[in-house]
Image (tube, coloured by chain):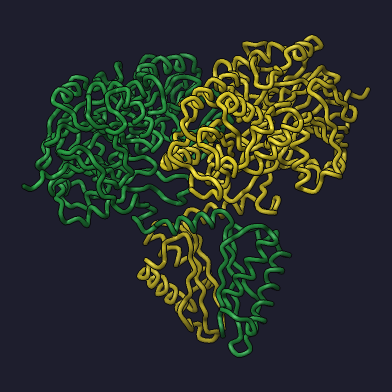
Chain colours: A yellow, B green
Amino acid sequence: MARKPKFKITPIGGLGEIGKNMTLFERNGEGFLIDCGIMFPANDMHGVDYIIPDYRWLEEREDIRLHGVAFTHGHEDHIGAVQHVVRSFPGIPLYATPLTTGLLQVKLKNARLLKSTKIHTFDAGDTIKIGPFKLESFHVCHSIPNCVGYGIETPYGMIVHTGDYKFDNTPVHGRKTDYAKLAGFAQRGVVLLMADSTNADRAGWTQSEAVIDGALDKVFRAAKGRIMVATFASLVSRVQQVVNAARNHKRKVCITGYTMSEYAKIARKLGYLDVEDDMLVSIGQAQAMPPRKVVFMVTGSQGEPSAVLGKLAAGRHRQLDVRDGDTIILSSHPIPGNEEMVYRTINRLIERGADVVYDPIEAVHVSGHACQEEMRLMLNLTQPKYLMPVHGETRHLHLHAKLSADNGVPAENVVMVENGVTVELGSGGISIGERQPGGYVFVDGSGVGDVGRAVIRDREILAQDGFVLVSVNVDQRSGKLIDEPRIVSRGFVYLKDAEDFLDQIRDNITDVVNRSRNLNGNRRNLVEESLGKLIYNETKRRPMIFSIVNEV
Amino acid sequence: MARKPKFKITPIGGLGEIGKNMTLFERNGEGFLIDCGIMFPANDMHGVDYIIPDYRWLEEREDIRLHGVAFTHGHEDHIGAVQHVVRSFPGIPLYATPLTTGLLQVKLKNARLLKSTKIHTFDAGDTIKIGPFKLESFHVCHSIPNCVGYGIETPYGMIVHTGDYKFDNTPVHGRKTDYAKLAGFAQRGVVLLMADSTNADRAGWTQSEAVIDGALDKVFRAAKGRIMVATFASLVSRVQQVVNAARNHKRKVCITGYTMSEYAKIARKLGYLDVEDDMLVSIGQAQAMPPRKVVFMVTGSQGEPSAVLGKLAAGRHRQLDVRDGDTIILSSHPIPGNEEMVYRTINRLIERGADVVYDPIEAVHVSGHACQEEMRLMLNLTQPKYLMPVHGETRHLHLHAKLSADNGVPAENVVMVENGVTVELGSGGISIGERQPGGYVFVDGSGVGDVGRAVIRDREILAQDGFVLVSVNVDQRSGKLIDEPRIVSRGFVYLKDAEDFLDQIRDNITDVVNRSRNLNGNRRNLVEESLGKLIYNETKRRPMIFSIVNEV
């Protein structure tokens, strides 16, 4: 008798974090994806604009029919690669809640893919059919409205995929994480819980977004001049909170920056941002108003130099500047790796006269992810047989696994994999299957995947010590130099201040070339070796070294 | 009547932080320094090993006689530039407490400057004379033993310089911050308090080092295999706490790494590290012992790839490896900018099978600096007329200034300057004086100061998109190319995968060169412009572009 086909789950891509940006679910040659997001490069991934999950192996698989992509919510790390995926799998339908659909449409429009892509929009709580699969969506609280997780029926019990979530009992938009649905899944039998691990190293509960209202009120009350609030463009509920505070304190709101304006427009249209027309003003109007009457919403809370706050800090914004008496609120936490840029930005804003408020000075931001007690609650609500901690770095997954033992899932029932490794669910339980090649694909400029590890490694070496290139013209017959060696160098030393050293380099090369007829080995290698030694001895640095030898 | 000469204070250098690494005190042509430390480069200061304060203007000043350098404590950011300063000011005497002297001696010995340098060693609480100046040292708690601040007599009242401090009431080494002496200064009249601002954004009190004992005990009790504790080499009190925990749990201690071993040796010799001979084992001995019987002390708690922990994470340590069942404690917090590397290291260690414990999982580290309530206590103990917040980024200085208003120092009596700006104290009060040029000097390899902003900027561009260089040989008479252009490129695209694009580049250059006789302008510029345009249009990248044109 043929064995029942297994249900397989493969997390794809994700830089540092596992099971976050994109996940493949498949059974018996049929499949679907949950999310397709991008990652932002680490500080040592020089010149990379963003990173997409490496799903090239999936494009090559002929044994699977992909029926669609279901989205959990509209953040970049969950929707940002949609144009790449739609190009790779032409005609693949998308499934999303209204706000997520709105944000997907912007991306697809920019990529000229909107008309050719079918998006099925559903409401949180709806059940959707994707090919042979049934997905029961359930609402979760996070830091953007309209987030869902999915209950997925399998022959082995239900899989619950939480998406990004927290249990906020007083959320800005009123709708709570769907306790009833989660408990209902438990009654039907949850075989596997795939749950967000982001804050697994934080005890207790994530604070409700409601605490921010109090903090904003306090800061608004004290502010004597203009107020600027920096946050993520996609943090629609935070924009709502700022609008509410502005309304209470009789200030108008000016939303700046292209992305934030676009997000706000969509959120308003779809009813996720409640703001009266006459509360919104343009930058020009805002500039003409008394400072106490206006709040600016700006991007750049991660210290990005090209966002509004970064430009304000550097004095490079074309319409706005920071003045004495301005109050600037950073309603965000630095993402690990961004701390240095964030603090530098804060320092510059203060130097320009602003009063800058950020957590921990006031509770102007809370996380959008569950802390330890919420993870326990999720385990206790869904009562899964197995746990697959996802959406976190290795350290978070391990801590999530640790706490599950006290909440019904012993260590032997926890499955932790790296991205690209398949988890298989069958009648015999859960097991680890194949490993797919690859991890992620760098996007740099218009190139997708042409910048690989080797190029990044070269950039790292160039960043450390620069390069030195010498070009020499050699007489074919005599083997002697016919003119002075030319030297091109950048990132090594400032050549104009190093005339003596340049002379030393020229002498060295002249000597090696003129002797090289009698030396064994390739002339170029001889030049490069000799030059490398000279440079290291003199400077203890190792720039990249190149030579061009013209025989004329 | 001639006016009484003012007492002048100039903070020097400091990357991001102000008034930390080095400070000049002077009056009437006589002066002394407090501390001369180094800074570590920001993530975008490519290839820089470390940074020293830029005191070149002080070397050039002929109107001042420097009588010595007084040190507050033995951390790198306070003593690390001693060899540079001793070379710049030959014969300058140093003043330090015994442990700081021990650490200075190691640095001077490595630089072959030990014999020619006079160090006056004193105990915390002693009064020292440096030229015409009288400095009354007082003990402060921090995260290395033997720290002091200074009370400095001036004709205008006392200046109190706290150094790095916190008010730990149960410190590891027993000695408290000297409340009596600080209160005594207040009775005599403190005109100016220069105080540590590091934790000005943290409410309450810094926890005592004593809490770490409890956390270590808990982790040691649970550990079933080997334990490794990573911390700063200079955190001698932490080494003591680990030794105490090891003693209680009947484990031996193996101190690994050159720097940590050196620090421990000096601290033991001087009585700041209490550990029995038979408790210390070598790596070889430790490897031969049962895993439950040993603790390794390692460096690398900031994720530095070249330190012991970094090598263990990468599997590149020659003698040690990480195994299933190991418990690794990170007894430190990431310094802003290091988070990404620290978390990456933790993830890799977990992947190798270790259980990794760090704050906030357990309270295995506390800060060495005062929080807000301690800053208030310092203000209330010393009752200064003026406050000069130091040792912090701009944001910390401003918050320190804010809280002082509630503690006897109104805003108009707070003086905040950047590094290089002189604060002047006279009978008329306090004022801001001259600004000195410079900020800091990069040390890269054996070069001090030869890598400047321009070189760093070039490294940044090279890191982003690499470079492309073309070399062409042109017939002098016809102006035509005589052979194929040669192309050297790194960090741009992987050339072996880009043959078509290389052909396109060659065609482009050939075309431009062959037409260039009839074109206006310099041939090299024409080649570089054309190539830059082609590359940007095709890739949306902007590598550095160079050309060499040989006329033969």
Name the side, left or right, on which B156 lies relative to A425: left
- Asked which quadrant contains residue A404, the reply is top right
- Asked which quadrant contains residue A168, the reply is top right
Q: Nearer the viewer, residue B539 or A30?
A: B539
Residue B23 percent across, percent down from the top left: 25, 42
**Residue at 65 percent of width and 11 percent of height:** A407
User: Looking at this rendering, what residue extends furthest in the bottom direction?
Assistant: B477
Name the side, left or right, on which B341 lies relative to B208: right
| A176 w.r.t. A51: above or below | above
User: Looking at this rendering, what residue extends furthest in the top direction?
Assistant: A187
**Residue at 34 percent of width and 50 percent of height:** B439
Residue A367 percent across, percent down from the top left: 59, 25
Residue A297 visible, this orientation: yes
Name the side, left or right, on which A123 lies relative to A322: right
**Residue at 40 percent of width and 14 percent of height:** B214
Which quarter of the rendering shows the C terminus of chain B? bottom right
Residue A42 percent across, percent down from the top left: 57, 42
Q: Nearer the viewer, residue A220 or B355?
A: A220
User: Looking at this rendering, what residue extends furthest in the right direction?
Assistant: A1
Residue B93 visible, this orientation: no
Residue B396 percent across, percent down from the top left: 38, 33
| A326 w.r.t. A475: above or below | above
**Residue at 88 percent of width and 26 percent of height:** A129
Q: Nearer the viewer, residue B43 or A319?
A: A319
Q: Nearer the viewer, residue B192 or A85?
A: B192
Name the side, left or right, on which A83 lies relative to B147: right
- Asked which quadrant contains residue A258, the reply is top right
